[in-house]
Image: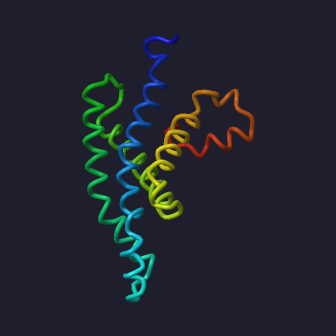
Amino acid sequence: VPDGYGKLPTIYVLVLTLFSLFIALPAVRTFAFDNVSFWRESAAGISPVSFYWSRVTADLPGLSLRAFVFALVFWSSSLVNASLGTVTALMLCTMLCASGLAYVIAIAVPSSLAVTVCGVLVCCLCGFFAGIVPTLREAGPVMRGALELSYGRW
């Protein structure tokens, strides 16, 4: 069992997984339960791209505030050797990736399963493909390609 700095990568993976769930699960609500309003707006002649872009833009300030608050709490309660700006930038990048994944899941998966599928995929992408187990040295070329998909490696 690693101690001290040996536990640090595992702690980061767990924190990023928790934060990704904290961002992705509310982001699923942006599109998962709006099928009726989407079809109504689409029938009125509004472009689907502008509908989705407006919803994402309206969702962005709330998600950014969550990222900043989470970064502030994490930075102040843990002893990281990074500045608050670095931790906030990491959380903002993770927010963009996790919310984007949640939006795609909300559009592609039926609304009754969207939250469950999002939770499972976020945990798998952030936890399993984080590059800790297996390490990048142990991974072959195919596994290394799969590990490149994970935002937990940031």
Q: Residue at coordinates 37% horizontally, 55% vertically from top-left?
A: 27
Front residue of 120/97: it is 120
Residue 34 appears in the figure: yes
Observer-nearest residue: 121 or 60? 121
Inspect this view and state whether residue 90 appears: no
Residue 116, compared with residue 106, is above or below; it is above
> Is residue 151 shown left or right of residue 16?
right
Q: Residue at x 70, y 32 (%)?
A: 139
- The answer to which of 115 and 77 lies nearer the viewer is 115
Residue farthest right in this picture? 141
Please state the horizontal and vertical placement of residue 120, each as a whole percent of the image. 51, 43
Give the farthest residue toward the front. 112
Q: Position of residue 150 (x, y in %)?
A: 55, 43
At horizontal 40% and vertical 36% (from top left) the residue drawn is 18
- Residue at 50%, 60% (x, y): give it: 104
Task: Tell me where residue 33 appears, x and y as whole percent.
Answer: 38, 64
Q: Quadrant of residue 38?
A: bottom left
Tell me where residue 55 sits by quadrant: bottom left
Residue 15 falls left or right of residue 101: left
Q: Is residue 112 above or below residue 88?
A: below
Number of numbered discs: 0
Q: How is the image coloured?
A: rainbow
Q: Position of residue 107 (x, y in %)?
A: 49, 64
Task: Give whichever of 65, 119 is nearer the camera.
Answer: 119
Residue 124 against residue 56 in the figure, above or below? above
Q: Is residue 85 left or right of residue 146?
A: left
